[in-house]
Amino acid sequence: MHAWRLRELQHEDLDQLIKLWHSSRDGHLHSVYSISDIMAAASDGNSIGAFVGTELVGAAVSRIQVDRAWILMLAQAPQWRNQGLGSSLISTLEESLAETEVVKISALLPATETRVQAFHNSGFGPQEELVYFERSVPVQPKELQTLGRLGGSASPRGLWDDMGGMQREKELIERRLVLPLAKADLAKSLGVEPPRSVVLFGPPGTGKTTFAKAVASRLGWPFVEVFPSRLATDPSGLAAALRQTFLDIAHLEHAVVFIDEVEEIAAQRTGGPPSPLQGVTNELLKTIPAFRAKDGRLLICATNFIRSLDQAFLRHGRFDYVIPIGLPDLDARKAIWERYIPDSVNQHVDIDVLAKSTERFSPADIEFAARKASQRALEEAVYGTPAGRGEPALQTRNYLEAIAQTRATSSEKTVNDFLDDIDRLGRI
């Protein structure tokens, strides 16, 4: 948890804002905007302050002009620089602008300004040879209604970086999916056709959904998950509801569309009489080529049982890649454990031992074991015998006990089948 608290600036904060403006300049003589411009903009709202206690330690002040928001001031007190505060301020400011008509967020900086990392971290890009930063808002105002009807959402930034471990899978997805889409013009100039649709497969609980959301976050595109079980309740029928969903998605400029457990609607067709499910499979097979015809969108389908998918579903031309997402390796397991060990006890816990003890555990299995250990520590603290003087409530042995009582989701057979599927069906 960050040490600062973010909220909209109020009139009573303006005196502190003036002091922050002076302290953040470090003696620089030039500024694009005067202090009077900044005070006027801060008084009009759409400005965010970061507070430690009652002290203002950072601020992002913006002014809206028609459909563009200008960041007039992004400042942090000297002792709070290089700690991610600037990126947090920009992210919260963007959230506050979500209900406005803003389609671009811009910043104009002095040519000598060097403290620009927060803009780079937040997806802004310098324009030509100017020190001018700009980034399009991922969801245009006219698209909000469509996105809401689909149950989609704007992707929070930083999900990609938050994914610990899984470096092999991350590098593969970064190179095959993200790079050609993020650098589309360069890719096309080199004869690379950006991917339009991919399949992620692997044992249950390996993070396929997390990867899909992280790709959307990395691209800055909205994320739409299609739930076949929900579409099945539509009075028009599952096939018709699926068709209408993709017609609605076509109105979005950019989108990462995700279908989990796609085997539910794309299973192997039998030679028997047509069934309602076969009609859904046929509809999906017709939908994918139409989806692929437009730039700026990516379909990600995930399955735990790739060998159950219809052969026509996986053929070349429908999916660019069929990417395996395996169980976390040792480094990934360390990163996952670190996420769930409380800071107050991590010095008493041997992460290496826990990682080695959870081979064949999925990320979800590790989370379950960690939470089990924490829950038992809570119950013991309230109802049990008090721990020894100075002894931490959670130690390595507590987690090892929870691991011993947690059954791995993936059996040895599941892992072997997955390795076989990589050889037979993977396409990277």
Image (tube, rainbow, N blue to C red):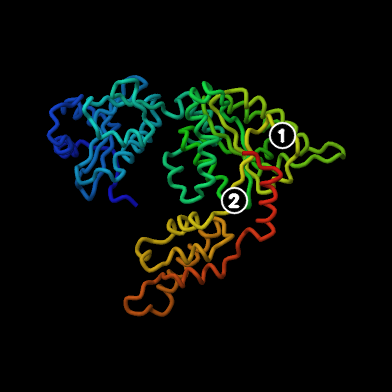
What is the quadrant of residue 20 in the picture?
Answer: top left
Q: Nearer the viewer, residue 253 or 422?
A: 422
Give the residue drawn at x 57%, y 35%.
257
Label 1 to label 2, Cα distance in Å? 22 Å
Q: Position of residue 397 (x, y in %)?
A: 46, 73
Label 1 belongs to which residue? 315
Q: Compare residues 212 and 143 and report the one nearer the observer.
A: 212
Disc 1 on helix, strand or loop?
Answer: loop
> Horizontal and vertical percent for residue 401?
51, 72
Q: Which residue is mark 2?
A: 326
From the viewer's perspective, tell me whether residue 147 is left or right of residue 312.
left
Residue 247 drawn above or below residue 167: above
Label 2 neighbour load within 10 Å: few <14, some 14-19, many 20+: many
Q: Amino acid at mark 2?
A: Gly
The dot on residue 69 is: none
* N-terminal label among 1 and 2: 1
Q: Position of residue 409 (x, y in %)?
A: 62, 59
Percent coordinates x, y for residue 398 in the rendering? 46, 71
Q: Residue at x 66, y 61 (%)?
A: 412
Is residue 244 something one can see in this rendering? Answer: yes
Residue reaching furthest to the front: 190
Is residue 280 in sight in this rendering?
no
Q: Residues within 10 Å of mark 1 (few under 14, many from 20)?
A: few
Which amino acid, mark 1? Arg
